[in-house]
């Protein structure tokens, strides 16, 4: 803790500036208004500690357009001075060589990387360069409704549970509660998005791409991956998850089922906590957090989705921009964001301090997952966004079009191989 306190104050000591250094720094992200309001506190404190510096926050509300807007602005020579880099976009930015290597500056601006979770620093390292200072992260987990488990006569699930234990739970949790012959409480849902089911594939000892990241053939079409996809896509077919027309027909359908006590298990990340807090505080739901199930003989593994503050190579204010990026990940900033429930701090001490204050116990369950975390493919493969779409289409081909799993997987593998071969 003493080392952390020193790290928190060091940037201030190192970045004192002269009154004549009038600088306007522009920072951008895809964050929500609530997140921007939290970060505004950091902007104002940075300005107070750096005379003559003014920070202008220029967020991009459309997440789908964010990456291209940042890349375009850098290419046009009018970049933001600091921008939020998503872990799944690291490879795309690295491929264009447009991000400043922050490694040489880390110590002098007070970022002691040894105090961070190594698993969330790793996604931002590319060929020896550090492309961002990581600010927060989340593993993928299953949230579960404790009350529904109790009603079904089930013990709460434990971290490290298996596919078979998961299946037994969702079978018992799926019910017709009013006796009209129609299921109105489901065990779980099937989320089409790759980030939601990638941990299942990893937990089966398989992957979506080959180790070198150059092919999907030889990975997603192997037996362990195919059997896991069969298991997952069978959930709605067997009635343990809402039918695809329902779950895909309305935004937030699965979350509404969960909040209303009609869904036993929902896969997501830490980003759900701020919304769930209202239900916890009102006593409307009793929650637990547990790992994504694994196949017997294999260990739990989950992608760790992190974001960090990066600096374009052509910012006109390199020194101040690096200092601001460092300021945004210092202990005080991370504690403030952690208090809001938005994410897990990347500083170990801040994360465990936050977990120790959490009466629900959820934060400690999230931290249990960290040693089993892996680097998402987006940090290693520049075409990840296209791969992500192909994998969503794969689920639709199986569940909606009722194509055989083996055939749909081979189709998707061919599409992804074509993307990676360009």
Image: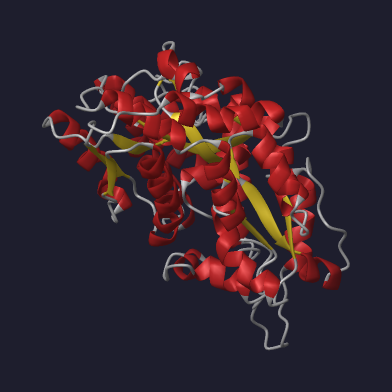
Q: Nearer the viewer, residue 251 or 321?
A: 321
> Can you say whether 82 is above or below 279 in the image?
above
Residue 133 appears left or right of 317: right
Residue at (77%, 43%) from the top-left corner? 162
- Whether residue 195 is visible to the viewer of this picture, yes or no, is yes
Residue at (68%, 44%) from the top-left corner? 292
Residue at (38%, 34%) from the top-left corner? 324
Expressed as whole percent of the image width and height from the top left, the position of residue 308 reads 44, 35
> Can you say whether 318 is above or below 64 in the image?
above
Q: Nearer the viewer, residue 356 or 73?
A: 356
Image quadrant in which you'd find residue 369: top right
Expressed as whole percent of the image width and height from the top left, the position of residue 306 reads 50, 37
Expressed as whole percent of the image width and height from the top left, the position of residue 297 reads 78, 29
Q: Quadrant of the N terminus?
A: top right
- Whether residue 206 is visible to the viewer of this picture, yes or no, is no
Image quadrant in which you'd find residue 154: bottom right
> Can you say whether 192 is above or below 295 in the image?
below
Expressed as whole percent of the image width and height from the top left, the position of residue 7 reads 58, 28
Q: Nearer the viewer, residue 110 or 190?
A: 110
């Amino acid at each position: 803790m003493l080392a952390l306190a020193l790290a928190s104050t060091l940037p201030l000591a190192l970045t004192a500036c002269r009154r004549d250094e009038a600088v306007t720094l522009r920072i951008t992200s895809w964050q929500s208004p609530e997140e921007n309001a939290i970060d505004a506190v950091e902007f104002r404190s940075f300005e107070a500690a750096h005379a003559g510096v003014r920070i202008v926050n220029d967020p991009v509300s459309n997440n789908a357009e964010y990456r291209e807007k940042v890349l375009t602005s850098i290419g046009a020579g009018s970049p933001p001075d600091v921008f939020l880099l998503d872990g799944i976009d690291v490879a795309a930015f690295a491929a264009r060589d447009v991000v400043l290597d922050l490694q040489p500056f880390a110590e002098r601006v007070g970022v002691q990387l040894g105090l961070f979770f190594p698993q969330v620093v790793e996604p931002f390292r590319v060929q020896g360069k550090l492309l961002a200072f990581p600010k927060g992260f989340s593993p993928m987990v299953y949230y579960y409704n404790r009350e529904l488990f109790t009603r079904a006569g089930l013990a709460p699930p434990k971290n490290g549970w298996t596919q078979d234990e998961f299946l037994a739970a969702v079978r018992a949790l799926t019910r017709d509660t009013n006796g009209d012959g129609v299921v109105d409480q489901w065990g779980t849902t099937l989320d089409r998005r790759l980030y939601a089911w990638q941990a299942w594939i990893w937990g089966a000892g398989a992957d979506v791409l080959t180790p070198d990241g150059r092919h999907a053939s030889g990975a997603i079409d192997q037996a362990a991956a195919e059997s896991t996809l069969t298991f997952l896509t069978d959930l709605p077919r067997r009635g343990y998850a809402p039918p695809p027309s329902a779950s895909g027909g309305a935004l937030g359908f699965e979350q509404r089922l969960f909040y209303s006590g009609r869904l036993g298990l929902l896969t997501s990340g830490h980003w759900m906590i701020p919304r769930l807090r209202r239900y916890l505080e009102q006593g409307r739901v009793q929650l637990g957090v547990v790992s994504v199930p694994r196949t017997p003989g294999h260990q739990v593994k989950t992608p760790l989705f992190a974001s960090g503050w990066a600096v374009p190579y052509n910012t006109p204010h390199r020194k101040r921009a690096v200092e601001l990026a460092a300021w945004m990940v210092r202990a005080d900033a991370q504690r403030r964001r952690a208090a809001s429930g938005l994410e897990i701090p990347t500083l170990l001490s801040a994360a465990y301090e936050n977990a120790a204050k959490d009466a629900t116990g959820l934060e400690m369950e999230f931290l249990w997952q960290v040693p089993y975390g892996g680097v998402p493919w987006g940090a290693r493969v520049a075409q990840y966004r296209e791969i992500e779409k192909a994998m969503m289409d794969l689920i639709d081909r199986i569940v909606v079009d009722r194509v055989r799993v083996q055939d749909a997987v081979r189709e998707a593998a061919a599409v992804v191989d074509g993307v990676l071969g360009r």
